[in-house]
Amino acid sequence: MEHQQHQHLQQLVNLDSLDNSNARALVLKLINVLLTILQVVLLLVATIANILSPFLHTRSVYLRASVQ
């Protein structure tokens, strides 16, 4: 009887570790997806900022020149 309980407990522990490893893998994949999305967003923001930078710079130069 004790042997059967021990085997049942061992099977439960194995199932728990399998669930934990699946959950851990799922969380890691989710984190990787979120980091990839964040990287793309930051790349877009940097690209837009670089495109707009010359226009904003010339505007500030014109404003400084007109104030003096």
Image (tube, helix red, strand yellow):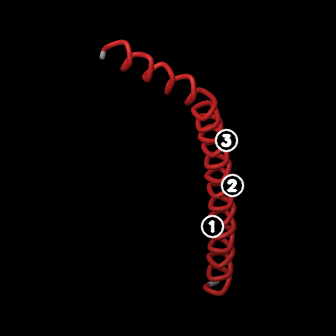
Amino acid of disc 2: Lys
Where's residue 3, x and y in %? 65, 87
**In the rendered structure, which disc, 1 or 3, sits on the residue that comes first in sequence?**
1
Quick one: 56 or 68, which is closer to the camera? 68
Q: Amino acid type of disc 3?
A: Val
> Which dot marks residue 29?
2
- Badge 2 element: helix
- For marks 2 and 1, the one nearer the N-term is 1
Disc 3 to disc 2, C-alpha distance: 17 Å
User: Gap in Å between the C-alphas at discs 2 and 1?
Assistant: 20 Å
Q: In this view, does 48 lie above or below 25?
A: above
Q: What residue type is labelled 1?
A: Asp
Mark 2, Cα crowd under 10 Å, few <14 / some 14-19 / many 20+, is few
Residue in the image at 62% along x and 30% along y = 48
The answer to whether mark 3 and mark 2 are in CB contact below 8 A is: no
Seen from this angle, which residue lies furthest bottom?
A: 3
| Residue at screen point 30% across, 17% down | 68
Q: Which residue lies furthest to the left in this view?
A: 68
57 vs 33: above or below: above
Tag 3: Cα neighbours inside 10 Å, few (<14), some, or many (≥20)? few
Residue marked by disc 3: 40
What residue sits right under mark 1 in the picture? 16
Residue 14 drawn at (x, y percent): 67, 74
Query: As rendered, which of 38 and 2 lies closer to the eye?
Result: 38
**Which circle, 2 or 1, is nearer the viewer?**
2
